[in-house]
């Protein structure tokens, strides 16, 4: 009988602990948002070489604690030569939570060189008759990156590897089948 009582007490304590854990507030998820396109949808022509070639608007929420800077990278992982960088932004101040469409970068932020060797946004421009995948990734970093102004995408991505507190991505596709 004593063992049964002890077992019952243990079970009740575990049930209480489980209920408390279920009632705990859910952790907020680091998010990247845009009204320009749907995640895993088609990128509008406006943001490509066939349109105005302007960067989409983005905002982000629920930033990881201890974030000091952000990096925003647009890469085409389906390019024939491997990762092709279309936009490389780093050292975005921790106070930044939004980039407007085609807007200039905030003070302190750096633009790295893309695959065309330009320190700017150049949107998707796959060869005619093909479709490519594009990934916009926002990284929350624990420090400012110590890389030279105009560093290329590969250099920036390598420099931030030990500083990533969180990352979030939006994926899109653009094709030039009918052009």
Image (spheres, grey):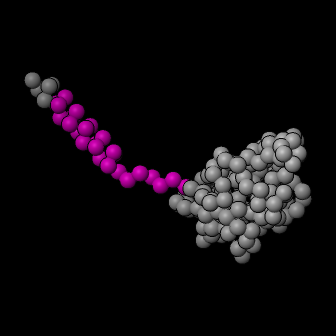
Residue 113 quadrant: bottom right
Is residue 114 a member of the stretch shown in magenta?
no
Residue 69 quadrant: bottom right
Q: Position of residue 99 (x, y in %)?
A: 67, 67
- The structure residue drawn at horizontal position 80% and vertical position 46%, both measured from the top left corner, is 175
Q: Is residue 106 above or below residue 6?
A: below
Residue 7 quadrant: top left
Q: Position of residue 20 (x, y in %)?
A: 29, 47
Can residue 177 be seen here? The reply is yes
- The structure residue drawn at horizontal position 90% and vertical position 59%, both measured from the top left corner, is 117
- Name the one closer to the observer, 132 or 107: 132
Q: Which residue is situated farthest in the bottom direction here?
A: 107
Quadrant in which the N terminus appears: top left
Number of numbered discs present?
A: 0
Is residue 15 a member of the stretch shown in magenta?
yes
Which range is magenta? Answer: 6-30
Q: Is 149 displayed left or right of 26 in the figure?
A: right
- The structure residue drawn at horizontal position 84% and vertical position 57%, both measured from the top left corner, is 50
- Name the one closer to the observer, 138 or 160: 138
Q: Is 176 displayed left or right of 1 in the figure?
A: right
Q: Is residue 42 above or below residue 10?
A: below
Q: Is 8 displayed left or right of 160 in the figure?
A: left
Can residue 68 be seen here? The reply is no
- Name the one closer to the observer, 70 or 170: 170
Q: Main secondary structure of the magenta part?
A: helix
């Amino acid at each position: 009988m004593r063992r049964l009582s002890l077992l019952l007490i243990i079970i009740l304590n575990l049930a209480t602990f489980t209920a408390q854990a279920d009632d705990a507030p859910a952790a907020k998820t680091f998010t990247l948002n845009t009204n320009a396109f749907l995640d895993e949808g088609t990128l509008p022509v406006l943001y490509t070489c066939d349109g105005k070639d302007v960067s989409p608007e983005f905002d982000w929420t629920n930033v990881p604690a201890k974030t000091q800077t952000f990096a925003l990278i647009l890469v085409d992982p389906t390019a024939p030569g491997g990762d092709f960088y279309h936009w490389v932004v780093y050292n975005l101040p921790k106070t930044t939570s939004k980039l407007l469409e085609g807007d200039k970068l905030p003070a302190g932020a750096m633009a790295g060189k893309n695959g065309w060797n330009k320190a700017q946004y150049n949107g998707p421009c796959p060869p005619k008759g093909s479709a490519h995948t594009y990934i916009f990734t926002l990284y929350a970093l624990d420090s400012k990156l110590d890389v030279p102004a105009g560093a290329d995408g590969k250099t920036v991505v390598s420099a931030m590897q030990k500083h990533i507190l969180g990352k979030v991505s939006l994926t899109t596709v653009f094709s030039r089948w009918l052009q």
